[in-house]
Amino acid sequence: MPLLAPLFRWGFPQVQPPVFSRGSFVELFLSHAGMVLAASLAATIVGIALAVFATRPAGRDFRALIDTVATVGQTFPPAAVLALAVPTLGFGPRPTIIALFLYGLLPILGNAIAGLEAVPAAVLDAAEGIGLSPWQRLRDIELPLAAPVILAGVRVSVTIAIGTAAIGSTVGALTLGTPIFDGLAGNKLPFVIQGAVLTALFAIVTDLAFAALQRRLQPPGAARSPA
């Protein structure tokens, strides 16, 4: 971004400095990505674990409760979660990670349940017929077959988290949203543009990477089918 300083200086001569300088954009990106990674990893582990539990005989009675809790977590606006978490956790990245975790859990949980329930019964019967234990069926049959659907949920969750993490700057977290809020507070449009463009590029590149991974996980016939 500093390489574009002459362009911003030409386009916004009244704004000094023309490029956000309170922190390096590498630092902002690494902090932003770290929070997204931590929250998304936790949401993926918890979401898949809950989906496995809900699709087992012992957990089917809890299916409605699990869906309700996950839905409530996403219904809460991230700003409200931040406001509630700050008095307990203080300012910084921790409230942001909690908000991203709650907001990203539902897409992963929903897709994981759908993927596991879509495994053909004939395949499960064949696995049982050759003597696989329930754990072996889950590990070697169900999860691999459900992986493309689960990954689609993770893709949605991570993309949402990248955009939502920007508001963490309102509670002291260092993110790509920091230039946006500094620019709004100081009436410096170049800062807003820089933060927004970098956040959007981060989300787009990540989404494209997940799309490529999804294509690799799909069966050959499905990969050739039109999108």
Image: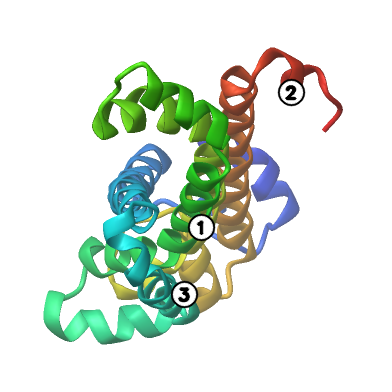
Dot 1 or dot 3, earlier in sequence: 3
Which residue position is annotated with label 3? 71
Dot 3 or dot 2, earlier in sequence: 3
What residue is drawn where x is 51% and y is 57%? 110
Taking the image as shown, residue 172 lies to the left or right of residue 44, namely left
* Residue 17 vs residue 153, the one in the foreground: 153
Which residue position is annotated with label 1? 110
Q: How is the image coloured?
A: rainbow
Amino acid type, callout 1: Gly
Q: Position of residue 150 (x, y in %)?
A: 50, 41
* Residue 113 vs residue 211, the one in the foreground: 113
What residue is drawn where x is 26% and y is 59%? 58
Which residue position is annotated with label 2? 222
Amino acid type, callout 2: Ala
Label 1 sits on a secondary structure element that is: helix
Residue 28 vertical position relative to residue 206 in the rendered view, above or below: below
